[in-house]
Structure formats: C-alpha cells, structure tokens
Amino acid sequence: IIADWFIANKESSERLGDYWLTHVPKPEFRMMDPWPSAFAQSRGISILLRAWQLTGKSDYLQTAEKALTIFSVAAGEKGVTTFTDVGPLYEEYPTHFLTGVLDGSIFALFGLYDYVRAVDENSEAERLFSEGCDALKKLLPRYDLGYWLRYNLCTESFYPKLDPATIMYFRMIGTQLDLLSRMSGDPAFAEFAEKWRKYDKRRNILRMYFHKFQALRKLNRL
C-alpha cells in the first residue's frame, strides 16, 4: 500500500525525473511553496525497491531509478543537492542557500545505498553514493562545536548563528554514522561517531540547551 502511494503521488519531469513534494511550509528556511527533499527521495527509493524485490513488478524499479535523477540537480534549481566546495551535499531542506541538516543528508545516503544494494546495474546510484559519502566526510568537522554538534550548516543572516542538535538528533547521528561506516566501508564515519559520543555529558547537554533556547527564540518557535 505504501509503495503504491509513492507511485500514485509522484511528480515527473524530464529534468527532475520522478520525485515527491512536501506541502508543509518550512518558514525557518524561507521555504513556503511545495518542495522536494533528498530525505523523501531516499524513503521512496528504499520502499519502492523492497516492493520490487517482493513482487517483481517493474513499475517499482522504474520509479526508483527515475528518483535518482533529482540528486544531480542543484537545490537552487528545484533539485535536492547543494554542490559545496568539497562535493555534493544531499539536502533534506533544499533551497537556494545551504541548509545542511546533518541527519537528513545521512538518511539520503541510506536510500542511495539501497539502490546500490538491490540493483546490479547501479552505476549512477554508486556514483551518487560515493560522491555523497566523500563530501560528507569532509564536511563533518564543520558540524563539530568542540562539545556538541550543529543541527545544520545554515549561515544566512536571518537564521541563528548557532543552532545545536537536540539530544535525540545528537544520539541518532552517532547510530547513523556507525551504519554509514558499514555501508561505505570507510572507518572515518565510525571514528567521528566515537569521538562525538564523548561529548554526551551533563555539562555539555546544559550548554547545548542554553544555545538551543536562544536559537528557538530567534526562530519564533517558543
């Protein structure tokens, strides 16, 4: 039922392939119109590939393949990728400036890995996954606050200068990086996870809450 929903509710174009739109505004990033997401693409790809593996129906595989297209289109051009100075960052919240929400970018890589895992002829998915992993590894130090992690990399003037991850996101990212290390075969991701777990201390949590309160107040979310 869920896989069929992804078939029935996709948008399609020659330039963007098959993709899905979120119709909930994201005002903190100035995103008011319906928007695509690398996170949504990854969930669609994973679900469709599992449906294809269970049923053998070609529609599921064809849509999953077309869902790869938008990863090569810049976020400022209605795609889902910010092409940074070190490579592509797949955006949960893509717009004309870098948002860089960390957990969403990792989830996007999980979907791409599913395509590599499930489909023998996967050169495009393998390229997207490999380039995305390489870029993310180089970007991870930019999230490091020395005692905690940034929620994202947004530096726009209207956005808080410092917006730390909540405890839930902080701990989830450690698990994500362990998984990504296994998927990619790169121990660097697990090494980052191990380093950051040492930040999970009471004094650092209190420091995070102080800055998070200030960030939420600037975003008018209190």
Image: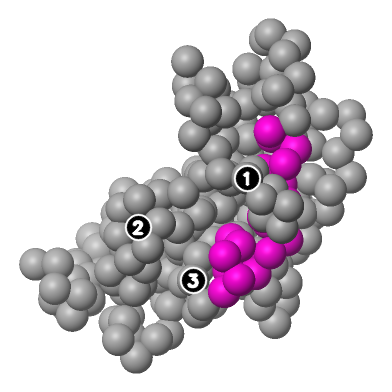
Q: Is residue 125 visible?
A: yes
Secondary structure type for disc 1: strand
Q: Which sits earlier in the primary sequence, circle 2 or circle 1? A: 1
Secondary structure type for disc 2: loop
Report the front residue among 181 and 104: 104
Q: Amino acid at mark 1?
A: Ser
| Extreme residue in the front direction | 13
Q: What is the distance, in whole Å, between disc 2 and disc 1 at their CAs?
A: 44 Å
User: Which residue bears the numbered disc 3?
Assistant: 95
* Residue 219 in picture, x, y percent from top left: 20, 75
| Extreme residue in the top direction | 55
User: Which residue bears the numbered disc 2?
Assistant: 200
Q: Quadrant of the C terminus?
A: bottom left
Residue 12 got which mark?
A: 1
Q: Are marks 3 and 2 in contact (CB under 8 Å)?
A: no
> Which is more foreground, mark 3 or mark 2?
3
> Which is more foreground, mark 2 or mark 1?
1
Q: What is the distance, in whole Å, between disc 3 and disc 2 at their CAs?
A: 32 Å
Q: Amino acid at mark 3?
A: Thr
